[in-house]
Amino acid sequence: MDASSWPGPRTGQQPRFDAKQRMEISGPGVVVVRLSDDDSLYHYRYTGLVLLTTTASNYVFIPQGVTPDSARPVIFVPKQDIRVDLGTW
């Protein structure tokens, strides 16, 4: 069982988000890519996360590759200065 099949208050979608600055986010399955358009407002794209829930000021994720036997980092991403795509692709 991996994080995408965990029961709980998550959307079940595979979100991605773009950030203005590089964030210290890592974990099994997490991928960060430097976007090539220097004129863009956003410079980094993060994938490989499962959305657990949201708060008034944060998105709360876990890495997609988390298993019951691995460390389970919870990642709080401030809603400011990021663009989130919650669609499934």
Image (cartoon, helix red, strand yellow):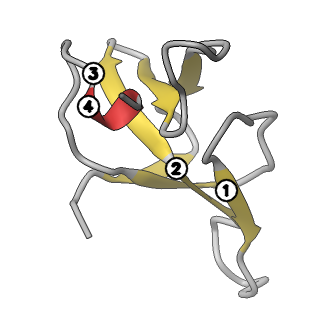
**Image x and y of residue 14, in percent:** 32, 51
**Badge 2 or badge 1: first in the primary sequence:** 1
What residue is shown at x 20% (from left), y 38% (from top)?
12
In screen coordinates, is 61 left or right of 69? left
**Image x and y of residue 63, in percent:** 54, 33
- 65, 9: nearer the viewer: 65
Count residues near mark 3 (Cα–Cα under 10 Å), then give few for <14, some for 14-19, many for 20+: some
Q: What residue type is labelled 4?
A: Ser
Say which residue label 2 marks. Answer: 48
4 and 3 marks in contact (CB < 8 Å): yes
What residue is shown at x 33% (from left), y 12% (from top)?
55
- What is the CA distance from the residue labelled 2 to the residue labelled 3? 15 Å
- What is the CA distance from the residue labelled 4 to the residue labelled 1? 19 Å
Q: What residue type is labelled 2?
A: Gly
Q: Is residue 42 above or below residue 9?
A: below
Say which residue label 4 marks. Answer: 5
Q: Determine the secondary structure under disc 2.
A: loop
**Badge 4 or badge 1: first in the primary sequence:** 4
Q: Quadrant of the C terminus?
A: bottom left
Say which residue label 1 marks. Answer: 31
2 and 1 marks in contact (CB < 8 Å): yes
- What is the CA distance from the residue labelled 4 to the residue labelled 3? 4 Å
- What is the CA distance from the residue labelled 2 to the residue labelled 4? 14 Å
In screen coordinates, is 15 left or right of 29? left
All told, the count of numbered labels is 4
Q: What residue type is labelled 3?
A: Trp
> In the picture, residue 44 is in which quadrant?
bottom right
Q: Determine the secondary structure under disc 4.
A: helix
